[in-house]
Image (cartoon, coloured by chain):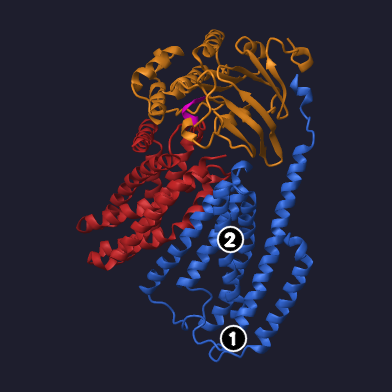
Chain colours: A orange, B red, C blue
Amino acid sequence: MPRETPHGKAGLELREVSKFFGDLEALKKIRLRIEPGDSLLLYGPNGAGKTTLLRVLATLSRPSEGQVLFGGEDIYRNAARTKAAIGFVSHATFLYGELTAFENLEFVGTLFRLDNLEKKVRDVLDRFGLGGRAKVPVRELSRGFQQRVSLARAFLHDPDFLLLDEPFTGLDAQAAKNLAGLLRELPEQGKTLVFSTHDFEQGAAVARRLVVLEEGTVRYDGELSSARLEALGIGR
Amino acid sequence: MHSLKVIWAIFVKDIKVEWRSRETLASMSLFGLLIVFLFNFGFEPAREETLRLLPGLLWIAFAFTGILGFNRSFAGERENQCLEGLSLAPVDPGAIYLGKVLANLFFLIVAEAVIVFATSLWYNFSFLPSLSWFSCVLFLGTLGYVAIGTIFAAVAANTRMREVMLPVLQFPVAVPVFVGAIEATNGALKGDAPGDYASWVKLLAGFSVVFLVLSFLLFEYVLEE
Amino acid sequence: MIQKIFHPTVHLVVTLVWMVVALFMIFLYAPQELMMGEVQRIFYIHLPSAWTAFVAYLVIFLGSVGYLWKRSQEADEWAQAAGEVGFVFCSCVLVTGPLWAKPVWGIWWTWDARLTSTFVLWLLFVSYSMLRSYLVNPARAASLAAVVGVIGFVDVPIVYMSIRWWRTQHPQPVIFGGEGSGLDPRMWATVLVSFGAFFCLFLYLFRQRIWLLRAERELSALRRRLPSRPSKEWSD
């Protein structure tokens, strides 16, 4: 049985995780614990390993060395359980252009065995302000709206962990503000948030914990409020 | 039983996508027709020769049409990395494979029906007397071909020059399908007693079962990184 | 381990000596075949290369299964090396076959069961190695190659059976009885010694290829450790 924390929920832990792509080492012996209720900002320059780290956590990419644990158990031991607990947003939208937002979510919901699917799809569409565009093929939506559908896709099955790679991409000012508000509420709902963004201010307005990645290693890990940003080379 | 729902959901999704875009079926059928059409210039079969050449002609047309369809079936999944999106879901990877098999089977059989119909007109050949056995052979041969084609198309989707890679992977492995299907089609069209070509039908059925099961088990490794 | 006990140079010398012995037996020891004459001696090259090619495909299969089961990188290297070296031996079969067939049957090629199956085997070697060189993401190479390796191996006996049945239904040129039927004991001895030489050569090439793959892997590991900071001026 997976070990449960006092919060009654399992955490994610990377143990000495490395990931190679041929000559490239995207992650170098990363050690990181993600506790339930964390709100964690991954920050770092291009190629620092943010995307790879999120993909490893999302079970899309197996570590070349090391192990990822979910509740003290290897995440691949019971892959279905891990996957059901994770909502993932990546650079790619994972959406079928010919299908409408509603159909895309309905399809995903079936794969996640959701009951009461239609209501859940409607709710999540409303949550991301997509109610009026639910019946439009995704291909015809702007990048910003596609991003919202992609977010809705990750939130649909109400996962405990939200792993979001650049979730603000393509969103206009209002949508970004709404998303930030929504992300801020997650820890109170007992959800765990791990996200990356290139806009530090935007991320800092949401997260409480900061992890700075550089060339595949953790340069800083701690409270965002107490981080000495100048020393980390993050200009305010 | 969840897996059955997943298989069905993927099938319905592919049909819907196809219904909106109308790209795959149209291009497959047209491509198949072109092969049959060009064949006519190459061999100019006389009436009495038609029967001898027909099984080979049909299966060569089906083979290339299939390649086109399998490539397209994963081109759609590659577009927004949808295949990764599928592997994020808590489903058996084998169910994803079977869903794609079902969709590819449907598309290829529809395209084959168009090709057979056109062949029947152009070569003045009636398939009606042997229709039931011919359909049975056609289905089993197509099933085996699709079983291999679907997993190889998923593999080839990870390569450069995937349009070339798929036939290079596919054709050698599918040799038993062609041999069996052409022989059995020949028997069926000639109106032989089914017992005369039953061993070929069994070969096709066996091939389908072996590679459906094997690919079902292996598909997990095709998705992983 | 093996590198130390049985040094590659020793291996090479043993292989060369063995090949000289095999050549001696092929041309001086084995009696002349009554029907085919001297040209039949190519048989002592042809058959051992075919056996070696089969062994190579078996190694691809074992390596592939080993990789899928244990995710052992070594198993993957075995499969890759066997694929490339096996291709050479299979090509040797396809070259010596027609050279033998022309004077004996009067034709270069016939679609007989054994020839056709060997040709399919050659295609499988080609597609296996070609796949490896066209893969985009090196992190996916091993598992995809292993899947193709396993499917190809399971396919080989089905191909052979189907082509055999197919041939029995069609007229074919008169071919002497199965190879090895009624062979003179000296011929048998020659075939076996020649196979030993070929197999020894296979092992030599195989181990050298594996050694090279390992060297590449170590080089990659070293390269990954190099500090790479090409994008410094871009990061801030």
Quadrant showing the N terminus of chain B? top left
Tell me: C161 left or right of A172. Answer: left
Q: Residues within 10 Å of mark 2 (few under 14, many from 20)?
A: many
User: Is B6 a magenta residue?
Assistant: no
Q: Identify which residue, B147 or C59, lies in the foreground.
A: C59
Looking at the image, can residue C51 be seen?
yes
| Residue in the image at 60% along x and 11% along y | A206
Q: Position of residue C186 (x, y in %)?
A: 60, 88
Tell me: C72 left or right of B105. Answer: right
- For label 1, the SS is helix
Looking at the rendered image, the disc whose residue lies closer to the viewer, 2 or 1, is 2
Is residue A135 depicted above or below B134 in this figure?
above
Give the quadrant of residue A157. Answer: top left
Q: Position of residue A151 (x, y in %)?
A: 50, 20
| Residue in the image at 60% along x and 55% along y | C129
Q: Name the amino acid type tagged 1.
A: Met
Q: Identify which residue, C62 or A180, lies in the foreground.
A: C62
Which residue is farthest left? B129
CA distance separating discs 2 and 1:
28 Å
User: Is A83 a magenta residue?
Assistant: yes
Task: Return the disc, 2 or 1, that comes first in the chain's sequence.
Answer: 2
Tell me: C138 left or right of B134. Answer: right
Quadrant showing the C terminus of chain B? top right
The residue beneath circle 1 is: C187
Q: Position of residue B118 (x, y in %)?
A: 30, 50
Q: Magenta residues? A: A82-87
Q: Identify which residue, B20 or B156, lies in the foreground.
A: B156
Q: Position of residue A150 (x, y in %)?
A: 49, 22
Q: Name the amino acid type tagged 2.
A: Val
The residue beneath circle 2 is: C59
- For label 2, the SS is helix
